[in-house]
Image (cartoon, coloured by chain):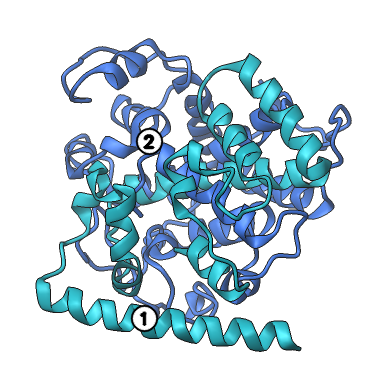
Chain colours: A blue, B cyan
């Protein structure tokens, strides 16, 4: 289901949603609808559809229950016309990310889907999943997906992206292209921010949504909080969620 | 590590086991920790009845704005954890050094994604211990100054 109407009205929410969170979610939906770096608007929205399909996917459920996620073969309950290998990656990121290995990136490459497309897909999957999780936690209905905006992807790969031991190449702070100098806020930054740097637009998207859902980077560094929750409470929520997802990072 | 650092800078001794053991939440030193942990657990488990109850309990404990903050942080870290796992990044070297002690205590080394971060040698662990003491000492000092202002 898609809509072109003003999204995230939160009219039915019993809890007042702060303005910066509404604005952050709206910007995320606008980015989702527009052509990206390697995927066009229709493909980006299709990735979002797969995120929602994955949560009810029979194959994903069977794989999650299996000792190895590669032990169970089959077809995903797909909601789009995306390539099967990309659909598989989207479903794995959504439902079983903790068991992703380099094999997934290798399988994508063998199917003709390059690492930058994978990184853009990670950015989209995690953005949609993040906003959907927030809605579920608040007991709110999921926002209808936006109408795709026509246009071609930009197709620009950072010149200094290099392998550093992760599954995908990344760009170091001192090696950013001139148009990406703003990418890390002019600082050396953590791997989790650099993780998507093969597609700089996804790093910008990550920073923007995190500032609305978590904290802006100044507050993050100062170990403060201007939210209703104090900093320790915020970090407890973050830490508990990460532990439940068995995320070492 | 940010939970520990936020406790250090605010002059509180926090029990980090609240992250991995819900039974430790109530006495962790973190306000309304048990209600927060229950809410996170219910958000991750696909149990809608428990989520309704946990949401109501958290709203009572921290108010509607606090509940919205908690839900937004849940959403944000559903994102961050998947980015880390799907890209296979290693823990940043400074974080790896500063968190080595409690990673072991909390059992985080057993997570599958820990394999992406190379294990430290004995010498590096000793140096890390010294740097950790120094780092958290500086944070304590900074926190005292901040609170004195």
Q: Answer few, some or many: residues within 10 Å of disc 2's Cα (few below 14, many 20 plus, some between 14 and 19).
A: many
Dividing the picture into quadrants, the one containing residue A9 is top right
Please give the residue where the numbered disc 2 appears in the rendered image: A93
- Give the number of marks: 2
Quarter the N terminus of chain B occupies: bottom left
> Residue at (37%, 59%) from the top-left corner?
A195
Give the residue at the far left of this rendering: B122
Residue B78 coordinates in the image, percent (x, y): 50, 41
- Asked if one can make out residue B137 in the rendered structure from this viewpoint, the answer is yes
Q: Is residue A106 left or right of residue B102?
A: left
Q: Between residues B55 and A132, which one lies in front from this camera angle?
A: B55
Which dot marks residue B133? 1
Task: Output the chain of dot 2.
Answer: A
Q: Nearer the viewer, mark 1 or mark 2?
A: 1
Judge if badges 1 and 2 mark residues of a common chain.
Answer: no
Q: Between residues A212 and B12, which one lies in front from this camera angle?
A: B12
Vertical comparison of A228 with A63: above or below: below
> Residue at (16%, 19%) from the top-left corner?
A71
Which dot marks residue A120? none
Q: Is residue B148 left or right of residue A86?
A: right
- Asked if one can make out residue A8 in the rendered structure from this viewpoint, the answer is no
Residue A64 coordinates in the image, percent (x, y): 31, 21
Q: Tag 1's secondary structure?
A: helix
> Residue at (69%, 27%) from the top-left corner?
A144
């Amino acid at each position: 289901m898609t809509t072109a109407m003003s999204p995230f009205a939160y009219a039915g929410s019993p809890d007042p949603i702060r303005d910066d969170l509404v604005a952050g979610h709206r910007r995320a939906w606008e980015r989702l609808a527009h052509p990206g770096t390697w995927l066009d608007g229709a493909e980006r929205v299709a990735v979002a559809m797969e995120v929602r399909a994955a949560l009810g996917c029979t194959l994903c459920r069977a794989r999650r229950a299996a000792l190895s996620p590669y032990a169970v073969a089959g077809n995903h309950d797909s909601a789009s016309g995306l390539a099967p290998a990309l659909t598989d990656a989207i479903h794995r990121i959504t439902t079983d990310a903790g068991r992703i290995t380099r094999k997934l990136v290798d399988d994508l490459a063998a199917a003709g889907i390059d690492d930058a497309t994978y990184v853009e897909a990670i950015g989209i999957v995690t953005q949609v999943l993040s906003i959907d999780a927030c809605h579920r936690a608040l007991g709110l209905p999921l926002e209808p997906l936006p109408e795709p905006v026509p246009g071609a992807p930009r197709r620009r790969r950072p010149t200094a992206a290099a392998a550093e031991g992760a599954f995908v190449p990344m760009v170091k702070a001192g090696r950013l292209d001139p148009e990406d100098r703003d990418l890390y806020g002019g600082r050396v930054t953590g791997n989790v921010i650099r993780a998507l740097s093969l597609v700089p637009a996804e790093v910008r998207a990550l920073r923007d949504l995190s500032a609305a859902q978590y904290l802006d980077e100044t507050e993050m560094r100062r170990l403060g909080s201007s939210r209703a929750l104090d900093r320790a409470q915020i970090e407890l929520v973050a830490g508990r969620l990460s532990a439940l997802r068995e995320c070492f990072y | 590590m940010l939970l520990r650092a936020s406790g250090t800078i605010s002059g509180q001794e926090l029990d980090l086991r609240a992250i991995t053991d819900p039974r430790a939440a109530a006495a962790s030193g973190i306000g309304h920790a048990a209600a927060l942990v229950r809410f996170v657990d219910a958000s991750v488990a696909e149990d809608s009845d428990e989520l309704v109850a946990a949401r109501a309990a958290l709203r009572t404990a921290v108010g509607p704005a606090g509940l919205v903050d908690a839900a937004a942080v849940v959403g944000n870290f559903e994102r961050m954890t998947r980015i880390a796992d799907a890209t296979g990044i290693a823990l940043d070297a400074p974080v790896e050094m500063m968190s080595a002690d409690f990673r072991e205590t909390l059992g985080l080394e057993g997570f599958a994604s820990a394999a992406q971060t190379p294990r430290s040698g004995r010498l590096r662990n000793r140096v890390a211990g010294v740097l950790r003491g120094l780092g958290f000492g500086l944070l304590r000092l900074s926190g005292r100054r901040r609170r004195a202002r």
